[in-house]
Image: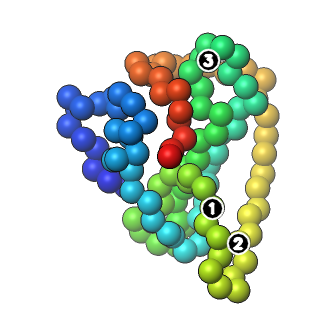
Amino acid sequence: MPAFPPETELPFKDPKALNDWLTYHDIDGSLTCVTVLHSADPDHSMGLRLEHTHSFSPDRENAGGHYHYDIESHDADTVEYEAYFNTAKMIYRIDRPEVHLERDLHD
């Protein structure tokens, strides 16, 4: 994960500033991911991301980060996922973001 900018430059004010800071890396499996999925955030009233994933490797140090999208396999390897899901009956919003980017995904 790249180093965060100085506190005076945070939070990111627009998607371009966020995209310019992000770096992308290919990581060999296996990865353990913790994901939050929301079905909706009516009127953006809670400022929720509909999907957000953090990952780490149980096999290696310093391997992990955020999951943004999968890559196409350039060889005969197959990507496999195993997932376990549960549902929440209540959402509590703590520390609503000061800045809400309309596009939380990236160009």
Task: Name the kind of residue labelled 1 in the image.
Answer: Asp
Is residue 52 or residue 92 the one in the foreground?
52
Crowding at label 3, few (<14), some or many (≥20) Cα neighbours within 10 Å? few
The reply, left or right, for residue 38 in relation to residue 98 is right
Crowd band around label 2 with a 10 angstrom C-alpha radius: few (<14), some (14–19), many (20+): few
For the residues marked 2 and 1, what is the alpha-carbon distance in whole angstroms? 9 Å
| Callout 2 secondary element | loop
Q: Secondary structure at mark 1?
A: loop
State the quadrant of the N terminus: bottom left
Task: List the residue tagged with mark 3.
Answer: 44
Taking the spot 71% from the left edge, 32% from the top edge, the residue there is 38
State if disc 2 and disc 3 touch (CB < 8 Å). no
From the top left corner, tell me how far across and down residue 2 is, in percent: 32, 53
- Residue at 59% across / 32% down in the picture? 49
Of badges 3 and 2, nearer the viewer stands: 3
> On the rendered structure, is 16 left or right of 52?
left
Residue 89, how many percent across, how many down?
78, 23
- Toward which corner of the image does residue 25 lie, by quadrant? bottom left
Dot placed on the residue nearer the N-terminal end, 3 or 2:
3
- Crowd tier of the residue under label 1, counting other residues whose Cα lies within 10 Å: few below 14, some 14–19, many 20 or above: few
Q: Secondary structure at mark 3?
A: helix
Image marks 2 and 1: residues in contact by CB distance under 8 Å: yes
Q: Which residue is mark 2?
A: 79
